[in-house]
Amino acid sequence: MDFQPPIINLLIVAPLLITMGAGLFLMLLNIFCKRDGVYYWLTLAAIAAALVQNVAMWGHEYGTFIARGSYPMVVSDNFSVFLNSILLLSGIGTLLISRNYLHRTKLERPEFYMLMLFSLSGMMMMGMANDLILVFVALELLSIPLYIMAGLAVSRDDSKESAMKYFLLGAFSSGIFVYGIALIYGATGATALPAVYAVLEAGSPLAMAGTAFLMVGFAFKIGAVPFHMWTPDVYEGAPTVVTAFMSVGAKVAGFAALLRVFTVALPAMSDAWMGALALIAALTLIIGNVVALMQTNIKRMLGYSSIAHAGYLLIGVAAAGQHSEAVGSVLLYMLAYLFTTMGAFGVVIALEHKLGEGIMLEDYKGLAKRNPWLSAAMLVFMLSLTGVPPTGGFSGKFYIFRSAVEANLWWLAIIAIMTSVVSGYYYLRVVFYMYMFDGDRTEPVYAGTALKTGLLIALVGTLWLGFFPAGWFELAYKAVIGTTQLLAGG
Amino acid sequence: MGNSFVFMLLAVIAVGSAIGMLVSRDAVHSALFLVLNFITIAVFYVVLNAPFLAMVQVTVYAGAIMVLFMFVIMLLGAERLRGMWGDRPSELVFAAFLGFLLVVTFLIALVMEGKTAVSANMIDSSPVALGLRLFEGYVFPFEVVGILLLSAMVGVVILTISNKRGKNV
Amino acid sequence: MTPGQIAIRALIVGFSVSMVMVTGFAYTTLLERKLLARLQHRIGPNRAGYIPLPGKNGGERRLIKGFLQPGADAVKLFLKEDQTPAGVDRFVYNLAPMLAVIPAILILAVIPWAGEITIFGAHFAPYFAIAPGLDVAVLYMLSITSIGVYGVVLAGWASNSKYAILGGIRASAQMISYELAMGMSILIPVMLADSLDLGVIVSQQSGYWYALHIPAAAVFLLAVMAELQRLPFDLVEAEQELSSGFNVEYGGMRFGMFFMAEYMKMVIFSAIAATLFFGGYRGPFVDQLPGLGFFYLFLKIVAGLCMLIWIRASFPRLRYDQLMAFGWKRLLPIAVLNFIIVAVVIVLQQEGIIF
């Protein structure tokens, strides 16, 4: 046997290479350059460059790293481009809202940017991976830097606790995930997603067990019930910028891989996983929303809220088992979730005057008087998280519910609508605190230029999605077609 | 026939050492059981015609990871657990139930399918074949794992170094 | 040959080789004591036995005084009271010496002792070893070396003594650290011979010894010394600091087993070094007379041992932080760099760009 190099087109993985390469470059730069600003701008530039390259790939379907007689290891289609854009935007958003925060909490260090870039490349890889092995590697590449980033505030016990919890449970779920891959390999003799699709027969018990294990792994990453236990603690303990980053990035990446793996490789099992996902979605919605009612810490509240949003997204995924159009609604929802969550965390960061202080609901009392613009922005984000028109949250939910109904998941849609109503209570409580109370807080509100820019982008995004969702939906809908055509081609 | 005898013997050792690891209340004994388990599994790989994997298994798991494990156990001094069943017996029962379910699933799979899609004889697992596979089909994940390990290493360094810094600040 | 025959042959060869090794290690101790004494201008053990030869003028020449010293030592170790300190983990305490010896014996399996040869009517091909033709032999060697740490770690932990545990932790940290550099340097012969089979590596050295790749050989030598915990890397048993390190609580034959493991490893690593870098059993006329292979390898092993002893006599002990810094900051980068250069050069040669 002689070595036969695979067909490689590096342009396709260029967004990944840019982020990873920038991370490595920062690492080397660390030896020579001690000025933090340099790292910030370089990271921003790298992410922007990756974004440009990523958007340039819209409308095409590529595969790369094709070894002889096998399927491409990495693929790029509209689906992955759309998701990568969301992820890169979340990276930019995190950077914008973190500028001042990292500085005043003394957390700013080159490694933060480096780890963020590595994690970001792992997240993007999740949506581009066409092989279960690569999905796993990407999962780890996204997780391990996040574990570390969660523990970055080493002097604080809750940060350490958060990192430890996230790491232990994450490692455990990764183990289960690998076991799932092994079982599917045992059932089909393949790890490439199209190859699994080609071989898999419905009702194979080994593959069924494998599918269940994969689902556990993904459910952990996206924080779905009953694998959500880590979420509130980790969200609360981690530095808020890290929380913001992982609440969007890790979740979107988890859904990206979930969608690709389940719709490309495992449609033969769709009866089984649709039901299971619908059940998980219902549980997630109920538990996430109900427990969020009792939270007084805003980061914890947003943690439970992110669990609840995973539930809404899961409805879309479950519906995608029946008709692929539902994937579009998931993507649109993710976009809305990105803007809204980033914005909400931006406001939280502005109010967190010291590491881990100023994040209780109490601290929001009278914010409307102290800083009307900030509280107005928070109002919009909270309305969007609730799903009140005309915000992005409403559009997202609207399309998700529609696809649920089209997939005959009536009961799920009803649960979702009811829990949305419930969620109004705890989201609007923040608004209530801001506008109806007179506060006695005197701590400064840290809203620097970068943070303001970030909030503005988030605000515009949220409202734009709310007022004109149709164009965005069309875009997201196109992102779906790509996936399914590639499926047929594979 | 000889092969199945070897298999049964190994299976008994592997399962026994796994149970021993769980039941043992002494962390060092648990770790030793785990080492035994890893080595048994390495022998499994040899029997399954995958000597390369066996050697890597011994080197990486038994030789590197478990030694570091031992280190941690010894340096932390958290060596003993109290009670046979841990702090929450109910969880143990639940876990046992889930494990039982898994075993049942595998039994069903065994009965329904009889064999899996892959078997040891199908695969050429010589070092040359493995290397080719790694650098033809899996070159991208292979390289990415490098980044992954690097980021883990960076994490270790910054978490421990800032630990020292934290005391000064 | 049927698998059964292969197994029986491996058993016979394995048994005889290990027996030779178990007795041979004893004479390694004598060699060390005598040679070390000479280097330090002493006489060394000279009481227990000698080889009588007729001398000049009808007198008697006494060759190798102290010839029976290893036997005397063995008797002493066996007869000594075998005491167990209080409060030890008995199971692990008893297990540790075994775990030290067993890996040392296991490595023997892959070392080629001679080329293709017929002994007592049995034909050994492609070369004479317990497990000839194993295509992962180098990895086997590395993996067995890596589990050799357990004996030391567990002995240190189980002894319930501060000196012992400090020695054990030092030892294992040292062994793990230097294993990396060693693995990297072993890869050079592997790449040059394009095989993980030790027999192939030896036969590929018919042209020139791989020791000519001086950085690789030097790194290997240094790493081996650290792996063996020999001076100047013997912090594990630094007498002034730790009395005698991980084995301080052991006595009698249990201590003897650690002793045995140490000297057997010396012999084995000399054999490995000879195999990987110094042409193994190859030498002049070995193709015509395969039996010479045993002799050549023996010579090379003795040379290796002498060098280890010489180094021990010449250099002072390092400090612990120096040891770690040397391993991680000097040896490993050199090994990696060397690895990269050799790899690139090999590829360029294959592509015909340079010769």
Image (cartoon, coloured by chain):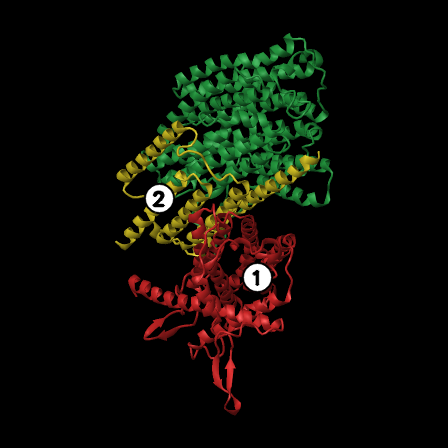
In the image shown, does A311 or B74 lie closer to the viewer?
B74
In the picture shown, does residue A296 fall above or below A163?
A: above
Colour chain A appears in:
green
Residues behind callouts 2 and 1 on a single chain: no
Residue A242 in view: no
Residue A209 in view: yes
Task: Estimate the x, y position of residue C208 in percent, counting from the top left.
Answer: 54, 72
Q: Residue furthest front?
A: C81
Residue labelled with disc 2:
B16
**Local secondary structure at mark 1:** loop
Colour chain C appears in:
red
In the image shown, does C255 or B119 lie closer to the viewer?
C255
Chain letter for the yellow part: B
**Local secondary structure at mark 2:** helix
In the image shown, does C28 or A120 lie closer to the viewer?
C28
Query: Which residue: 60% across, 69% down?
Result: C310
Give the chain of mark 1.
Answer: C
Q: Amino acid at mark 2?
A: Gly
- Circle 2 or circle 1, nearest the eye: 1
Query: Which residue: 62% across, 26% down?
Result: A240
Q: Amino acid at mark 1?
A: Arg
Q: Is residue A156 left or right of residue A334?
A: right
Task: Estimate the x, y position of residue B87 in percent, counting from the top left.
Answer: 43, 29
The quarter in which the N terminus of chain C is drawn is: bottom left
Residue labelled with disc 1:
C230
Task: Estimate the x, y position of residue A384 in percent, counting from the top left.
Answer: 57, 17
Task: Estimate the x, y position of residue A61 in percent, counting from the top left.
Answer: 50, 38
Give the chain of mark 2.
Answer: B
User: Contact (CB < 8 A) between labels 2 and 1?
Assistant: no
The quarter in which the C terminus of chain C is drawn is: bottom right
